[in-house]
Image (spheres, grey):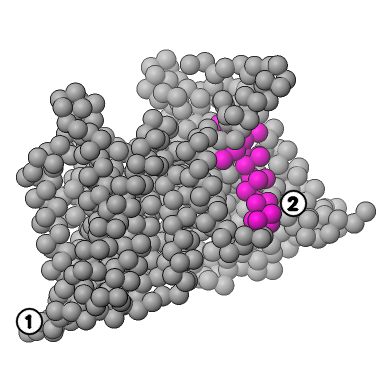
Amino acid sequence: MVIPAYYITLAIITGIYIILALSLNIITGFAGQPNMGHAAFFGIGAYTHAILTTRFDVSFWLAALAAAVVAGAVGALLGLISLRVREDFLAITTIGINFVVVSVFLYHPFFGQAFGIGGIPMPSLFGRVLDKGGLLVLVLLAVLLVVWISRRVEGSWFGLALESLREDEQAAEAVGVDTRRFKVMAFTLGTSLAGLAGALYASFMSFISPGDFAFSLSITILCMAVVGGLGTIRGPVVGAIILSLAPEMFRFVLDYRLLVYGGLLVVMMRLQPAGLLGRGSFLVRLGQRLLGRRETAPVP
Amino acid sequence: MLAQQLVSGIVIGGVYALIALGLTLVYGVLRILHVAHAAVYATGAFVGLTTYQRTGNLWLALLVAAAFCGVFGALIHRFVYGPLLNQPRIVPLIASIGLFIFFQDFLRLVFGPYAQSFPARGPFGLLDLGSVILPGRQVFILVVTMVLLVVTWYVVSRTRLGLAWQAVAQDAETALAMGVPVPRVVAVNFLFGSALAAIAGVLVGIHYNSVYPAMGEMPAYKMLAVVVLGGLGSVPGTVVAAFLLGLVETLLVGYIGFVLPRDALAFVALILMLLVRPEGLFGKGGA
């Protein structure tokens, strides 16, 4: 069976969005820290990968690892900033980081300026260069990896600490949670996964330019996580799938796409602020009633 | 040449101040980052332009834009922000971004995607001050801006309404308990801040002689930086930060040809500032 290239492309892009939404979810959903510049880390990963593979002949695998490490290192810096700058101030700072990172890509010759970087090779395995289908398998494996990491985080002491940090930072500190360390860890983990997504994206596109990592992408990623349901794992996955397929399904309203998109966000926030699949959303309650089950309520 | 640049920087800074003041007023009482404010600003520019094209009266254009957008802003508060106040902070923020995207696209559909010129002719003449020659448009913008800034300062610091605003900004619950009609103060606040943004929109349209649907894109986020630089919720801080940014941008671009694009400058300043002095220029802690 031959799957048309169009569907493979769509699936790869959707997979990359799922990784982005889930990695943002670790920072904003689990730890409750606003991050409105997630695309910057995606971009840092993509540029690291592109520079290493095209100029230094580094293999895909090593470059992808480096992309995650570099993005995570910058993310750790942001984590340190978040110790000093909070809530709304932090939200605006992350917006600023996105703008500054994109303008560095755009203005520094090292990053190819407006021309971007081209000729990024596809990954090769055992001496064979993967085709798009092979890359799709790789992306799906990466999605599974990120889901697995998210589940591990959710069920661990680390996850509990992040939840306490999200619900009430002062109370968490009072009972002895080292909120500073966990905040930095959440930022490092989330941004390094975004860097990994950047490596996959760079390989897939074979050409990247600063516009690919603009602030509007950060908003899109955030919307995916929020529309699906921040703080859960199913939420960002479903949100990413819906919002990355939506432009394809809404072809018939192509000219009104942004109008519909913006309107949906407002209506969604007004009626279902916890997201479609967040805790206590109408879909989740409906599902529970149908299955006759109750979700274990979060400890108040 | 320097004097010319300085004046140009002050004109831009004044317009920034008008836009950012609305954000500060809203943040002061509701603690919402009102990104959609930039959509109000762009709408104001279009309403002003349309009025001007029909009547040819610049003052009427300013007035109609201010009135229309004042009501627009109050409606945004009534139907979107009001019901979301008890949600986590990220919910009104996302709603605000959604509103911004929605109305920006709405403007594009109504007025078309292209820039329209704003051929304002009004009470302008060249003002020649020896070393500085001011085109009439700039004089007009400067005068309107200064008058509005003085009015805002007067309203916030010298009237009962301003006093009520300060009380609500400090502690809404206590203010309510003391008999301040909080919902009305918040509504008037939106009306006033949005009217300022609309006038700023018209002035920017005149200044660059162009009005286009995406004109809110830059101020939407850059003005947030200005508001933070001034210390979130501080009125004098916002005005000072706006003028500083206008001046620094103009001077750096004019003299050094700064290595970063003009619009990234605000954020570089913002990040440095937050690291050194997280409460902003005039903030009183609380970061």
Q: Residues within 10 Å of mark 2 (few under 14, many from 20)?
A: some
Q: Could you say whether the residue bearing mark 1 is in a helix, strand or loop?
A: loop
Q: Quadrant of the N terminus of chain B?
A: bottom left
At horizontal 48% and vertical 16% (from top left) the residue drawn is: A300
> Residue A125, image x and y in percent?
82, 53
- Chain containing mark 2: A
Quadrant in which residue B141 is drawn: bottom left
At horizontal 10% and vertical 82% (from top left) the residue drawn is: B127
> Residue B188, image x and y in percent?
22, 45
At horizontal 50% and vertical 43% (from top left) the residue drawn is: A267
At label 1, the amino acid type is Leu
Q: CA distance from mark 2 to mark 1?
A: 65 Å
At horizontal 9% and vertical 84% (from top left) the residue drawn is: B128
Q: Which residue is label 2 attached to? A: A11
Nearest the eye: A215 or A155: A215
Image-based side of A295 in relation to A176, left or right? right
Nearest the eye: B261 or B215: B215
Give the residue at the far right of this rendering.
A1
Q: Could you say whether the residue bearing mark 2 is in a helix, strand or loop?
A: helix
- Chain containing mark 1: B
Look at the image and say whether residue B219 sits in the magenta stretch: no
Image-based side of B60 in relation to B213, left or right? left
Residue interval drawn in magenta: A227-250
> Residue B216, image x and y in percent?
38, 62
Residue B129 image label: 1
At label 2, the amino acid type is Ala
Quadrant in which residue A204 is drawn: bottom right
Q: Are marks 2 and 1 on the same chain?
A: no
Q: Tell me if I can see residue A186 in this picture.
A: no
Examine the residues drawn in magenta and state their main secondary structure: helix
Q: Quadrant of the C terminus of chain B?
A: top left
